[in-house]
Image (cartoon, helix red, strand yellow):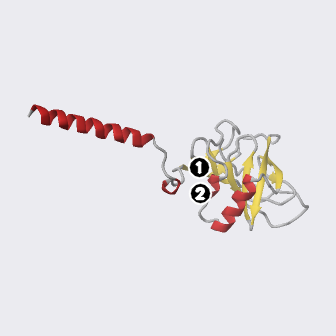
Amino acid sequence: MRHSAWIAGAGMLGAAFLLGILSVAPLPAYAKGAPRADVLEHCSWNRPGADPFMGDVVAAVDRYPDIAPQVREQLKARMRARQYDEIVVISRDAIRGKGNYDARISDMHFGPGRVCRNVTRSGWSEQMQERGLVYCVQGACILVPTVCRNVSRITQAAAAGPRGAGAGGVPGGGAPG
């Protein structure tokens, strides 16, 4: 009896050791899914840079499943190569650049794996501005503000009025980070 208790204890210790080792071992690439993101329906981006995105900026594009896979791959390739379309100026009520964009910013990745679906910049003063890199492929546009690396989506607006007006969309649309 004494030996069987010792053998059982040693077996349990060995199993615990193996589980401990396996828990820190990296997963093979095919077993890794996209990290689960905490999704917030509404939030404000009133302090840009306060909670910057800590994840892989390029990989975040894969969390937009409504963008066609081949378009996501093209966006990611351009992002890896830093081949952005333009640098825009983000203000409280607009996103201005050479292209026309709606003011709304959505699906912003920020902090350690959080996503905000609907973002507001309503706490910004009229003078407050940030800059961001814009990547567009076949109508799908990604915005990466330089202050925080937050990955988000914007929409190209129909060309109406003077080029570069950038107005339209939801006033105060924005996000966290």
Kindly identify the residue that appears in the image at 38 percent across and 38 percent down: 20
Percent position (x, y) of residue 118? Answer: 63, 53
Q: Note whether 1 is above or below 76 in the view shown.
A: above
Q: Is residue 104 left or right of residue 21?
A: right
The mark tally for this picture is: 2
Query: Which mark, residue 115?
Result: 1
Are discs 1 and 2 less than 8 Å apart at CB?
Answer: yes
Q: Quadrant of the C terminus?
A: top right
Taking depth in this image into account, of 88 and 35 the one nearest to the observer is: 35
Q: Provide residue 169's location: percent of width, then percent of height.
A: 74, 59
Q: Can residue 30 be seen in this view?
A: yes
In front of the other: 8 or 115: 8
What's the residue type where badge 2 is placed? Answer: Arg
Indicate the secondary structure of the residue bearing disc 2: helix
Q: Which residue type does callout 1 highlight?
A: Val
Q: Which residue lies furthest to the left in this view?
A: 1
First reached walking from the N terminus: tag 1 or tag 2: 2
What residue is rendered at 77% in x and 62% in y? Answer: 156
Q: x, y percentage for residue 93?
A: 77, 50
What secondary structure is marked by label 1? strand
> Where residue 11 appears, x then y in whole percent?
24, 39
Reading the image, the residue beneath label 2 is 63
Circle 1 or circle 2, nearest the eye = 2
Label 1 environment density (alpha carbons within 10 Å; few <14, some 14–19, many ≥20) = many
Say which residue appears at 54% left-offset and 49% top-offset: 37
- Residue 50 in the image: above or below residue 68: above
Q: Residue at point 67% right, 62% down? A: 73
Residue density around tag 2, few if under 14, some if 14–19, many if 20 or more, within 10 Å = some
Hey, which residue is sitting farthest right in the picture?
162
| Quadrant where the N terminus is found in the figure | top left
